[in-house]
Amino acid sequence: MNNRKYYYKAGDFGLFAGVLFLASITGCVSYEDRPPQGNVYFAPAGVVVMQEDYVYYPNYECYYSESRHQYAYREGNAWVSRPAPRGVTVNVLLASPSVRMDFHDSPANHHAVVVQKYPKNWKPSGPNSGQKENHKDDQHEGNDGR
């Protein structure tokens, strides 16, 4: 005859009930990190996908991204994006010839072709040759580019 008695504390039952509850609800949650094959994927609400748009300044080999409000240019062998152009004030840059680019990715991917088409000292021809696009921010006013 076995005289063993099993005693359970009140806390043991609470622990068991908590584990049982967690195990039952975890089966109700599903996660999918990619859309099923053949279906269309929509970005989650609040996510905005913006295309880059650039204005190029041939005299300074500098691009301005209107969507990011950043200037992109080569610094040595690397491409950098900064809130101000290098070595020139924003006002001087705005007064120089510029051309709107038709690509929407990194200027590094197109720069070799762009500099051939728009070399330094390039000037636009036509009636709008003196018209400038205004894209300076209030924070750039008086910035000397250093």
Image (tube, rainbow, N blue to C red):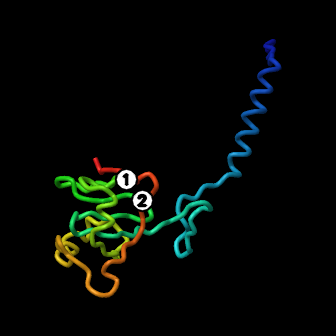
Quadrant of the drawing holding the N terminus:
top right
Q: Which residue is drawn at 75% across and 33% down?
A: 18
Which one is nearer the viewer's eye here, 45 or 131? 131
Would you name the residue on which mark 2 appears? 69
Which comes sooner in the sequence, label 1 or label 2? Answer: 2
Residue 11 against residue 3 in the figure, above or below: below
Q: In this view, does 92 lie above or below 7?
A: below
Residue drawn at (23%, 69%), measured in percent from left and top?
Answer: 58
State which quadrant residue 85 falls in: bottom left
For residue 1, say whether it is visible.
Answer: no
Quadrant of res 25: top right
Image check: 11 left or right of 69? right
Q: Residues within 10 Å of mark 2 (few under 14, many from 20)?
A: some
For marks 1 and 2, give the CA distance: 7 Å
* Image mark for residue 92: none
Residue 17 in picture, x, y percent from top left = 78, 32
Q: Is residue 2 above or below residue 143?
A: above
The residue at the point 34 percent across, 52 percent down is 82
What amino acid type is highlighted by mark number 1?
Pro
Q: Which residue lies furthest to the bottom in this view?
A: 126
Q: Do the residues labelled 1 and 2 touch (CB within 8 Å)?
A: yes
**What kind of element bears circle 2?**
loop
Residue 107 in percent (x, y) is at 29, 66
Judge whether residue 134 can be spotted in this image: yes
**Does residue 113 appear left or right of residue 48 in this picture?**
left
Between 3 and 45, the residue placed more toward the observer is: 45
Element carrying mark 1:
loop
- Residue 99 location (% of width, % of height): 31, 75
Amino acid at dot 2:
His
> Label for residue 83?
1
- Residue 68 location (% of width, % of height): 43, 60
